[in-house]
Image: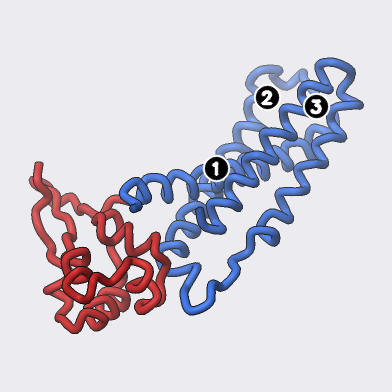
Chain colours: A blue, B red
């Protein structure tokens, strides 16, 4: 497993753990107890530093194929951000029509949600691409 | 990432002789070839399995490592159905 795969797994584990913890606490107690736990998502920001590419002596650890996979994963992540924001803005309007209203804290939640979705898609894209190509690894 | 290219009627794939050439060159390991060409072992594995098409630069580096021409390492062929 290379550093990009570790980065992807780390992100997925952090996001799943945080959402599970936050959701459970919210259900058991109140949103005021559960939502602050979303701060654990901040660990996603340091996973790239923790799993940075350490140069192996006498060899490469990041090459043209890794760069291609990384670029494709970024493209996949960017391609879901716009549909996510369109859906987040338009679906409430379709459901509640013009008479509905949204609390102001929903806006940063949409922003954070877009970030989480992008990271999840990027991580899955990395793992799928390496997994698909690495089946013949010996 | 599939390397076969749809050409309408039949798909084509870039085959390679890397495994054979490695063994003909002193049973060179994938790691040794990776070190000599400046890529990771995972990339050599993916190229050998025809799961990744290398750049021209890397293709020439691999051929030069074995001391042969690029077309002796890589062939553009019809994919078996």
Q: Secondary structure at mark 1?
A: helix
Q: Residues within 10 Å of mark 2 (few under 14, many from 20)?
A: some
Q: Residues within 10 Å of mark 1 (few under 14, many from 20)?
A: many
- The residue carrying mark 2 is A93
- Label 3: chain? A
Question: Mark 1 or mark 3, which is nearer the start of the sequence?
Answer: 3
Q: Residues within 10 Å of mark 3 (few under 14, many from 20)?
A: few
- The residue carrying mark 3 is A102
The lab-note entry on whether marks 3 and 1 share a chain reads yes
Q: Which residue is pictured at 14% across the width and 49% down the height?
A: B11
Image position of A56 (left or right of A25): left
Estimate the x, y position of residue A36 in percent, counting from the top left: 87, 35
Estimate the x, y position of residue A9 in percent, counting from the top left: 59, 45
Q: Disc 3 vs disc 1: which is toward the camera?
A: 1
Determine whether A29 is above or below A47 in the image: above
- Label 1: chain? A
Q: Which residue is pictured at 33% across the width and 64% down the height?
A: B44
The lab-note entry on whether marks 1 and 2 share a chain reads yes
Estimate the x, y position of residue B24 in percent, counting from the top left: 16, 72
Does the CB distance between marks 3 and 1 fall below 8 Å? no
- Label 2: chain? A
- The residue carrying mark 1 is A121
Label 2, label 3: how many angstroms apart (C-alpha)? Answer: 10 Å
Q: Disc 1 vs disc 2: which is toward the camera?
A: 1
Q: Which residue is pictured at 33% across the width and 66% down the height?
A: B30
């Amino acid at each position: 497993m290379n550093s990009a795969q570790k980065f992807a797994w780390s992100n997925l584990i952090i996001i799943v753990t945080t959402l599970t913890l936050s959701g459970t606490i919210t259900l058991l107690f109140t949103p005021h107890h559960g939502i602050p736990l979303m701060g654990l998502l901040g660990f996603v920001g340091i996973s790239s530093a923790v799993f940075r590419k350490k140069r192996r002596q006498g060899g490469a650890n990041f090459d043209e194929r890794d760069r291609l996979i990384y670029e494709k994963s970024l493209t996949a992540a960017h391609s879901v951000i716009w549909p996510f924001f369109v859906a987040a803005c338009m679906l409430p309007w379709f459901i509640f029509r013009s008479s509905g209203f949204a609390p102001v804290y929903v806006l940063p939640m949409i922003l954070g949600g877009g970030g989480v979705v992008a990271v999840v898609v990027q991580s899955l894209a990395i793992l799928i691409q390496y997994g698909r190509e690495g089946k013949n690894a010996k | 990432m599939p390397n076969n290219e749809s050409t309408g009627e039949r798909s084509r794939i870039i085959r390679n002789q890397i495994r054979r050439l490695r063994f003909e060159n002193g049973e060179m390991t994938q790691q040794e070839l990776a070190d000599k060409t400046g890529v990771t072992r995972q990339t050599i594995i993916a190229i050998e399995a025809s799961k990744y098409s290398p750049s021209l630069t890397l293709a020439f580096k691999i051929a030069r490592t074995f001391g042969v021409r690029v077309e002796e390492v890589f062939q553009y062929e019809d994919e078996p159905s």
